Image (cartoon, grey):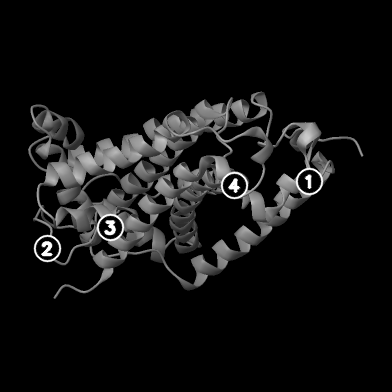
Amino acid sequence: MRPSFFHHLHPPTIPARQARLRYTLAAGGLAVFLVLILGITGILEIFYYIPTPTEAGNSIQTLTFLVPFGGLVRNLHFWSAQFLVIVSIVHPLRVILTGAYAPPRQFNYLLGMGLLVLAILLDFSGYVLRWDEGIRWALVTGTNLLKSIPLIGNALYTILVGGTQPGLATLIRFYGWHIFGMTLAAGILVAWHIFRLRRDGGIAVPPPPLREDQTRITRFELLRREILAMLLASTALLLLSTFAPAPLAAPITASAPASETARAPWFFLWVQQMLKLGNPFFWGVVVPLAVLVLFSLIPYIFPKPVKPELGRWFPKSNRIAQGVALFILLSIITLTLLALLPAS
């Protein structure tokens, strides 16, 4: 069979053992697939979305209930965004737990962390674009965290919000960053990440003399597996989009403070829970940034995985990095669950 364009996007062969789903979790391929769905559905939504405080919420209502298949398109966009954040977390976590950031892959790991940050920011900005009563925390409390930063906080708040309080300028800025600024940056990083993956030798494996299994699969088999994963992901997305509609609330009618029962989007619930502990600058800005920096520096500050142990889960040579990553992940999950508990 003659290779097609899509075949040429893959290396001719890759090690069979490291190509198994239980090793890769298909996280990288699913991330690219979800980005494509988000791009297509996002373009379709642009035709009906009106980025003004008085019309944004109503335009989403129109898209959801009046436009043929508009609700399905919006639901696909919403669930793809949620899964993209999950996959973007699972992917670097898998890299840490398998030691796949070993030299020369440290820089590509940083690119992956950058994509994780962009996935969260894109989800957050899209969340705000709903401009309904359900996004009060993100709009008010989330942006007010900038004010807690010493010296430059008020200036950063004004730059982000476009004034002294959220309004038309805020919505337009979030809209511009969501559909152009951050989307363009994400596209560049995705291409760079894939390029570096090929340049660094593909999937992390031991040197040939140290491999227990020398079997390799062709690009044809790899593409077949990827298509199967995409079909399964499409089925799951269609089922969710059919039976679990994206959140929708009444349009915002006034810029009022967030209520005590307001919640952050799920990926920031752990930050919302920490804000209850005290100083908003420390718990809402310093600690999340420290977690991000620590994760980003793992390939540089912890012992390097040794080559004979590459291509397997939980290599002994990077147990410290594994322990730190799992401890932070468990802490975030615990804080998230606490935030979901009803207030006493």
Describe residue 62's horizontal placement relative to residue 150 as left or right: right
Mark number for residue 16?
Answer: 1
Residue 73 placement (x, y as % from top left) = 49, 57
Could you say which is closer to the camera, residue 301 or residue 199? 301
Three-letter amino acid code of the residue under disc 2: Ser
Q: Which residue is mark 4?
A: 33
Q: CA distance from mark 4 to mark 3?
A: 27 Å
Three-letter amino acid code of the residue under disc 3: Leu
Whether residue 80 is visible: yes
Mark number for residue 269?
Answer: 3
Residue 304 placement (x, y as % from top left) = 53, 32
Classify mark 3: helix, strand or loop: helix
Query: How would you rate the neighbour count of disc 4 (Cα within 10 Å): few for under 14, some for 14-19, many for 20 or more?
Result: many
Q: State the residue at coordinates (56%, 69%).
A: 239
Q: Earlier in the sequence, mark 1 or mark 3?
A: 1
Q: State the residue at coordinates (67%, 42%).
A: 311
Nearer the observer, disc 4 or disc 3? 3
Q: Earlier in the sequence, mark 1 or mark 4?
A: 1
Classify mark 1: helix, strand or loop: loop
Mark number for residue 259?
Answer: 2
Nearer the observer, disc 1 or disc 4? 1
Q: CA distance from mark 1 to mark 4?
A: 22 Å
Could you say which is closer to the camera, residue 209 or residue 256? 209
